[in-house]
Amino acid sequence: MTAVAPARVRKGRGIELVLLLFAVGIVTLAYCNVELAVNDALPPNLLVQVGWLLGVALAFHLVLRWRASYADPILLPLATLLNGLGLVMIHRLDLAHGRDLGSSLALRQLIWTAVSVVVALVVLVVLRDHRVLRRYTWTFGLGGFVLLLLPLAPGIGRAVNGSRIWIGLGPFTFQPGEIAKITLAIFFAAYLVTTRDALSVAGRKVLGLTLPRGRDLGPIVVVWLLSVGVLVFESDLGTSLLFFGIFVAMLYLATERISWIVIGLLLFCVGAYVAYLMFGHVQTRVLLWLHTFSPEALKASDQLAKGIMGMASGGMFGTGLGNGRPDITYFAESDFIFSSFGEELGLIGVFAILMLYVLFVERGLRTALGTRDGFGKLLAAGLSFSVALQCFVVVGGVTRVIPLTGLTLPFLSYGGSSLLANWTLVALLLRISDQARRPEPDPGVRPSSSSEETQVVKLR
Amino acid sequence: MNAPIRRLATVVAALFAALLISTTMIQFVFAKSINARPDNRRTLLSTFGVQRGQILADGKAVAESVPSDDEYKWQRKYTQAELYAHVTGYYSFLYGAGGGLEGSENDLLSGSSDKLFYQRISDLLTGKKPRGASLTTTIDAAAQRAAEEGLGNQRGAAIAIDPRTGAILAMVSHPSYDPNVLASHDIDATVKAWRTLTTDKSQPMVNRTIAGNLYPPGSTFKLVTAAAALSSGKFTPSSVLPGQAVLDLPGTTVGLPNDGHVPCSPTGKVTLTEALRVSCNPAFGQLGMDLGQDAVRAQAAKFGVGDELAVPMRVTPSVFPTGLNEAQLAQSSIGQFDVRMTPLQVAMISAAIANRGVVMKPYLVKSAIVDSELSVVDRAQPERLSEAVTPEVANELKSMMIGVVQGGTGTAAQIPGVEVAGKTGTAETAAGANPDAWFTGFAPANGTPKVAVAVIVEDGGNAGSEAAGGRVAGPIARDIMKAVLGE
């Protein structure tokens, strides 16, 4: 047996640092662009602000070097760039609405970014191995369902813009659905990895499709009822579609049975159609979607129409940051932030933003491919797919692919709960990717030096 | 589990592909039609949101955009609104830009012109807001004011041009209007004002100097007939023409009477010079018939009749009718029947005679500048349009026109110490209506000509039926010329 030098695995931390600097550079340019366009001058404390952003990014980077040195090097720069661009656009809308420092949404978003990054770092430091999460399978499951249904609770539930997906606690409002996205993904992953064998047992064959056994339909029906409940009682198609979509996707990943997807889609279509027939607010949403510019629809709401006119006015190259009028559209900094970018950065700009999301999801799925344990695979794939699906629901909503719903665009939109959830999601993906990319210690070769030994011990 | 993850990646690709297609549909494929929607406030606001260039007359802004506190960002303001209304035009977010330079130079003023390409690039790089170029007009503020005051409350038009270049020095059309009310951000007020202005029978929004229904030029057209005669070589200023009270016209019983049905001279015969001095109808009617309609029409065309011009506002082409019989030719030769001219065209005839026979292309914009850098984007170059007559014929016509002002129908246009050349006109418009009073001329006639004018006062002005071009329009023309000469 010849001695082969083990291939050196690149950790990628150096690349990450370069990309982070690049991301902060782009955000800085965008920020200067806005200030020059609106105020004809560079922001007065530019260096301080850029310094803070750089500091937060570098802190994250250093924690990764310390606690997850093999983590995927692209995810953090992508999240930083999207978060930073979102901040710039929110700041730009602050300027358009004449909001001062006290009422500035950008400032709040910045504080939430800091809080979210701290939470994400705590997750990274405390959670040394993602498999620990499996111990709390049912806690996460129960927590997720409760969070999802919390807005329906009398007293704390709030309806904003027609959707009852908020809770209010004193001066704070929160979208618990965002957090539920993560806890439920953990629950689904843990639950499915234990029950996958039972769920993939073949049942009857209908039209060439192998159906699961009848008694295994229980979980999907429960999740379906929950989704339909969210759609009907919280009147939020987005959240409903998101949860059901994540569940069906993970169910398919666990069992490799196409039949689950077919059953899931059918169930969703039936649920959505019944809801359409029974509830006026669902019908209004569909009218706005199919006949956005009809007089009846415009009478109900011209928000979608305004968002689309904004995007159209951006055209190919956009008006330039600070030179459009995204403030005409309501919720331009949250639900419609994609339209705001479309208006000011043009088709080219939004293509670039969509590509950032594609890259993010791709890195997440790659992590899932590389992970060695089933739970990690399911969790990483589920979380990545949730980002993709959420982008589809939000952007598809404002560009009339599907009816408009009230979800936020990950990292970009204004909203503390959304930032918190998505940065936590990044922390989980980074944690899983650290294990996916870490070379397995070769049991045949003992490490020769004591320092390497220490390293292995330290990380397990 | 890796195979289904790869399949899931395909689903993700499909989801994002759908988003790429949907955004392309909105921002590229249907962008134009969405932007063109009348309820699209962004389109309105984007045109309103740009700092539009100024329009300057004699160094002073007569139209400018000042910051406004509302969402439109800029308010278009017209200082001396009524005085310059037909030069500036209006800029309304309900009715667009029109009525003058606002309309015809919209690209430059709004900053979207290709001439501003490099400026736009530099604005883009420095993050500056795009802004429009400012226009320096050729207007002489004193001449403009003299024209305005001369016309007073009478309907009509006055225009002055520099014969050597074609630069328009004064452009006044009465009645005028206030473009500020159309530029208002108060939608209801704007709609009301527009309705009033567009239904007003006196058509205040029509620029009578270059457009509208045009006017019969009356006796001012005799300059064209005289030019054709002298150019033909068959006539000289001293050629003798019939000057009886009424010229018999073939095929009619009415004949072509002289003004007041009196002979042009006691002898009933006049020279060409004399005929122009007293504006003798029978002489020019006969002259036209002798020359033939093709010669008269060709001469008119050489002065610019029938040309499509833009100053840069579109000028309605003047008309000399075709297919005339002898009687109609005789009437046309004194500027009646279906001859129709703009005051600008009439001024161009005087200008050509002043400028040794050469017609210069009229223009209103001297240069387009980008205000902050004071860099010139575009500068007008005087352009020859045609040679209407030879310098010799121009000289002969000039002497004849000097005679008109010195001791003919145009004495009211005399300026002490300055040689003035001119021609009056009194044009019959319709049965029962008072005639239009004309005066055209130029000064100084003995040196380098500096100004050529045409003035028309509709419906006899304040003089009613007593109107004669000389008395009504002459003093107005005189005051404009005096203003230009600085007298």
Image (cartoon, grey):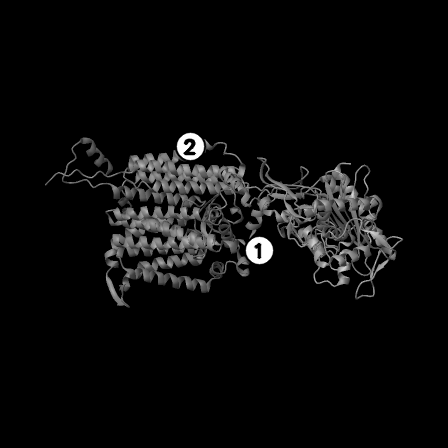
Quadrant showing the C terminus of chain A: top left
Residue B6 in view (yes/no): yes
Left-right relation of B309 to B29: right
Q: How many marks?
A: 2
Left-right relation of B43 to B186: left
Determine the secondary structure under disc 2.
helix
Determine the secondary structure under disc 1.
loop
Outermost residue to the bottom: A207
Verify CB contact (< 8 Å) between mark 1 and mark 2.
no
Residue that carries the numbered disc 1 in the rendered image: B38
Quadrant showing the N terminus of chain A: top left
Residue B127 appears at what percent x and percent y?
50, 38
10 Å crowding of disc 2: few (<14), some (14-19), many (20+): few
**Label 2 chain ID:** A
Residue B60 appears at what percent x and percent y?
67, 38
Outermost residue to the right: B266
Kind of residue at badge 1: Pro
**Residue A200, located in which quarter of the rendered image?**
bottom left
Q: In this picture, is A203 found above or below A236?
A: below
Q: Which mark is residue A51?
A: 2
Residue A173 appears at what percent x and percent y?
46, 46
Outermost residue to the left: A1
10 Å crowding of disc 1: few (<14), some (14-19), many (20+): few
Kind of residue at badge 2: Gly
x 23%, y 57%: residue: A197
How far apart in space, not on screen, are marks 1 and 2 (Cα)?
A: 46 Å
Residue B107 appears at what percent x and percent y?
58, 47
x 36%, y 59%: residue: A224
Is there one chain holding both mark 1 and mark 2?
A: no
* Front one among B395 and A207: B395
x 28%, y 37%: residue: A69
